[in-house]
């Protein structure tokens, strides 16, 4: 009976984590059901209902009866910035004839409800968070692959995404699928490196990790690739020591490791011979990705590409170049306009951190910048101390958010604020968690008896 109750409790925690995943990373699955399976093609109401379903899944049975302490400083910074955005939208709007009041207010309501429910969710979700993320991202990747196979308009060489013709944010955007792959890679690595993970689950996480890496290559998004490189550098810096490298190198020259390496190389060679087309496709994507990025570098330097024509920036890089030029002109000619900013959504810069300054002014930039600086600080600390799996996951996941602060989106996008809400709830509060949810070393208990010699007191 006790085991059955524990099973029900675990399933209940997994239910809440699935709800969190729908808000953090729901777009790939939503687009798959909505458009690839043609349940409601191009219907934004379907997206809103799916997000609301995620919020419903997050509701714990102890809602309003037991609240959990978030990171208070980050919490009030986030609330203050969201309130400032709403005030700017109604009082100091930078878009003449702005008509999206209802839509934006729904977005802000979703963010606030999500943050409120996170404060109600018990800390025990830490125990099941990583396995649920691995499975959730795996299903999302399988849905993407199915849609690519069945989509007659998609051809090899195009970026992996579900092609749509509607105005939903993230729709048809490969960044939604690269984020899913990035989250899956992190979760698979954490689950794979956990010594308590069962061998079958290790194999599952290895398979899912390889699939995530393949999807990341197919989406060809620079921000996710750069974030992955940063995450790997941080992981190596905090977890790999010179002594470990020397020990690992020495161990490679023993008979068993040599046999494993030989068998592995034979297996890889056989795989590539049997599935050469898949290898050639991924190789072509990698080479094409490198060539496009080199062309952007050539364009910035005013050089010519290898084929002899003058290199040009792609649309995304060109937009950020124009945004940087606009911001430079403002600093040189009208710096006083940055005190209050130019108004809510005045100009889409594609550089969220700079847009928070140009549109929301110094105060908005300070709130948004300090919040992200604090998250970065706690992320680095979590990567170095490894307090629990959820904190480590959010720390490495923030590397993608950090890169996108300079490369993609707007400071009020829900794609920023759902992850930031999760980080406000779970980062920097590790000292408040019970011992069974942390990896803090417990004090050793010794059975050694210490003899105390009585000391005669002077009479």
Image (cartoon, grey):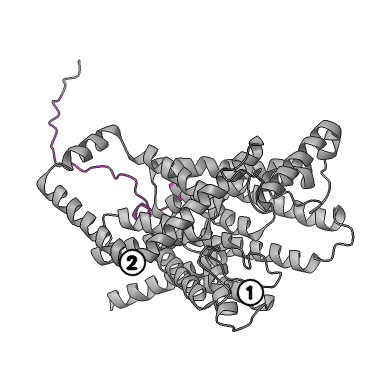
Expressed as whole percent of the image width and height from the top left, the position of residue 377 reads 52, 40
Residue nearer the viewer, 404 or 222: 222
Expressed as whole percent of the image width and height from the top left, the position of residue 147 reads 51, 75
Indicate whether residue 450 is drawn in magenta: yes
Numbered range of the magenta stretch: 431-454
In the displayed image of the protein, which residue is found farthest to the front? 308
Q: Is residue 164 above or below residue 176?
A: below
Expressed as whole percent of the image width and height from the top left, the position of residue 65 reads 54, 67
Q: Which mark is residue 47?
A: 1
Secondary-structure class at tag 2 = loop
Instruction: Check disc 1: other Cα within 10 Å, few if <14, some if 14-19, many if 20+.
Output: some
Locate the N terminus and report the quarter of the image it occupies.
bottom left
Q: Is residue 455 left or right of residue 396?
A: left
Q: Which residue was labeled with disc 2?
A: 275
Q: Is residue 229 above or below residue 184?
A: above
Q: Is residue 16 left or right of residue 442?
A: right
């Amino acid at each position: 009976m006790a085991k059955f109750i524990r099973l029900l409790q675990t399933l209940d925690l997994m239910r809440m984590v699935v709800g969190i995943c729908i808000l953090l990373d729901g777009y790939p699955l939503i687009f798959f059901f909505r458009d690839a399976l043609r349940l409601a093609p191009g219907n934004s109401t379907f997206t809103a209902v799916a997000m609301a379903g995620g919020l419903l899944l997050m509701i714990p049975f102890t809602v309003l009866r037991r609240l959990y302490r978030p990171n208070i400083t980050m919490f009030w910074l986030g609330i203050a910035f969201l309130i400032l955005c709403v005030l700017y939208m109604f009082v100091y709007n930078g878009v003449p004839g702005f008509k999206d009041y209802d839509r934006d207010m729904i977005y802000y309501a979703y963010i606030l409800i999500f943050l409120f429910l996170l404060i109600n969710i018990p800390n025990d979700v830490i125990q099941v968070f990583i396995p649920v993320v691995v499975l959730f991202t795996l299903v999302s990747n399988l849905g993407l692959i199915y849609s690519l196979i069945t989509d007659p308009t998609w051809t090899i060489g195009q970026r992996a995404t579900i092609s749509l013709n509607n105005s939903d944010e993230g729709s048809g955007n490969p960044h939604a699928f690269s984020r899913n792959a990035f989250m899956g890679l992190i979760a698979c690595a954490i689950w794979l490196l956990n010594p308590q993970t069962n061998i079958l689950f290790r194999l599952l996480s290895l398979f899912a990790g390889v699939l995530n890496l393949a999807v990341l290559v197919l989406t060809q998004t620079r921000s996710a690739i750069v974030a992955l490189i940063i995450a790997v550098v941080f992981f190596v810096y905090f977890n790999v020591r010179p002594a470990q490298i020397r020990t690992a190198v020495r161990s490679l020259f023993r008979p068993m490791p040599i046999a494993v390496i030989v068998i592995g190389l034979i297996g890889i060679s056989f795989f590539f011979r049997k599935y050469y087309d898949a290898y050639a496709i991924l190789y072509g994507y990698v080479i094409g990705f490198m060539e496009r990025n080199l062309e952007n570098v050539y364009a910035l330097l005013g050089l010519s590409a290898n084929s002899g024509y003058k290199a040009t920036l792609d649309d995304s890089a060109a937009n950020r170049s124009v945004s940087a030029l606009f911001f430079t002109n403002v600093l040189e000619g009208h710096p006083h306009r940055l005190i209050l900013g130019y108004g809510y959504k005045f100009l889409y810069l594609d550089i969220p951190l700079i847009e928070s300054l140009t549109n929301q002014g110094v105060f908005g930039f300070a709130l948004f910048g300090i919040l992200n600086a604090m998250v970065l600080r706690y992320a680095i600390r979590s990567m170095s101390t490894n307090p629990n799996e959820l904190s480590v996951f959010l720390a490495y996941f923030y590397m993608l958010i950090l890169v996108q602060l300079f490369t993609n989106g707007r400071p009020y996008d829900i794609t920023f604020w759902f992850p930031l809400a999760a980080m406000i709830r779970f980062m920097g509060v590790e000292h408040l968690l019970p011992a069974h949810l942390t990896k803090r070393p417990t004090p050793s208990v010794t059975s050694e008896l210490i003899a105390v010699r009585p000391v005669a007191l002077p009479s």
